[in-house]
Image (cartoon, rainbow, N blue to C red):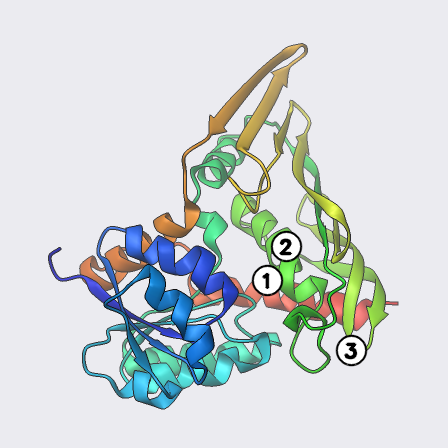
């Protein structure tokens, strides 16, 4: 491997163990070198997968390590901004899980820290690397649906576990932050448009939402997004235009929820379905990160774009009833 990005993992989360560490290990140009965890019990499964993995006892120790180029941050949501800034100040590149921040102005701090450090900092919004979403964006840009009139988004799963960080008050949990990022961000990515008005009806538990029914107005089209962490698993996105429609049946957890498929109908009784059975969007995300760091390739989801999704989430909370 020539000039790989040497990764350090900041925290022993289950998602890091099952999804991101395997993806980083598989990705071209990536090498997982170290993990920071205060718990030997939580760190042990990582060492079982990667026997040469070094375990640091403190987060600060990992940030100070000279053999680490980039930090992956899978910590609870409310810790993302502070530890991303600390990693940047330590001279590391950073890939941080979504939601990267709790409010849109937090991104201004992240952008300033990124620019001061001269390093790449990005939100782990993996769907923009998946070819089904690249195809969806191209279809819309080419006008193959005619005039886009409406977008319908549904994303739900049932997670009532009180011990899960998504359900622990004060830790930045809830549906909008966890999966509303996808419901809003995918529309912004595919259309290149920004919302003009957002209204929401929310069902709350403690200080977080479990059901969000959101209506947004974009230039030229409307959008309805439904997200919930208390309903059976479902994922769909439909773009409906004057000359056709397009549906993505596994738009977010492609390959886990279901096989990724994009169906396009532009003539009555004529449908074309594209399938993506072998794509790992987390591997593609890591490889895009490598290409940006090592070769200067433009990263497809910079902090400025991620900020716009957080602004929509903020607006949904502000209008929620």
Q: Earlier in the sequence, mark 1 or mark 3?
A: 3
Residue at the spot 76% in from the left edge and 56% down from the top edge? 228
In percent of width and height, residue 112 lies at 41, 82
* CA distance for labels 2 and 1: 6 Å
Residue picked out by circle 1: 309
On screen, residue 296 versus residue 164, left or right, reads left
On screen, residue 129 versus residue 260, left or right, reads left
Label 3: state its secondary structure: loop
* CA distance for labels 2 and 3: 21 Å
Residue picked out by circle 2: 184
Residue at the spot 71% in from the left edge and 76% down from the top edge? 168
Residue 143 location, quadrant: top right
Pair 1/3: label in front: 3
Pair 2/3: label in front: 3
Is label 2 in contact with label 1 (beta carbons under 8 Å)? Answer: yes
Q: Against 183, is 50 above or below?
A: below
* CA distance for labels 1 and 3: 20 Å
Q: Is residue 205 visible?
A: yes
Residue picked out by circle 3: 207
| Residue nearer the viewer, 147 or 181 | 181
Label 1: state its secondary structure: helix
On screen, residue 275 versus residue 163, left or right, reads left
Locate the C terminus by quadrant: bottom right
| Residue nearer the viewer, 103 or 235 | 235
């Amino acid at each position: 491997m020539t000039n790989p990005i040497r990764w350090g993992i900041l925290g022993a989360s289950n998602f890091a163990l099952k999804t991101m560490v395997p993806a980083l290990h598989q990705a071209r140009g990536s090498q997982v070198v170290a993990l920071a965890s205060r718990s030997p019990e939580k760190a042990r499964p990582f060492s079982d997968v990667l026997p040469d993995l070094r375990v640091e006892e403190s987060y600060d120790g990992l940030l100070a390590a000279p053999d680490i180029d980039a930090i992956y941050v899978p910590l609870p949501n409310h810790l993302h901004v502070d530890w991303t800034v600390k990693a940047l100040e330590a001279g590391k590149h950073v890939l941080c899980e979504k939601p990267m921040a709790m409010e849109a102005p937090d991104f201004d701090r992240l952008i300033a820290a990124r620019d001061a450090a001269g390093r790449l900092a990005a939100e782990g919004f993996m769907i923009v690397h998946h070819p089904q979403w690249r195809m969806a964006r191209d279809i819309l840009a080419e006008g193959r649906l005619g005039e886009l009139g409406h977008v319908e988004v549904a994303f739900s799963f049932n997670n009532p576990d009180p011990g899960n960080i998504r359900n622990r008050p004060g830790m930045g949990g809830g549906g909008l932050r966890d999966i509303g990022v996808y419901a809003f961000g995918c529309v912004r990515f595919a259309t290149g448009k920004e919302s003009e008005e957002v209204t929401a009806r929310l069902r709350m538990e403690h200080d977080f939402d479990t059901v969000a029914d959101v209506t947004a107005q974009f230039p030229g089209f409307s959008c309805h997004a439904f997200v919930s962490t208390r309903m059976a698993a479902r994922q769909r996105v439909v773009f409906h235009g004057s000359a056709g429609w397009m549906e993505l049946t596994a738009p977010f957890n492609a390959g886990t929820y279901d096989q990724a498929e994009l169906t396009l109908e532009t003539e009555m009784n004529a449908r074309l379905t594209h399938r993506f059975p072998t794509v790992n969007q987390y591997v593609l995300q890591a490889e895009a990160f490598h290409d940006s760091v090592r070769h200067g390739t433009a990263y497809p989801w910079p902090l400025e774009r991620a900020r716009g999704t957080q602004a929509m989430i903020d607006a949904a909370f502000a209008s929620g009833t």
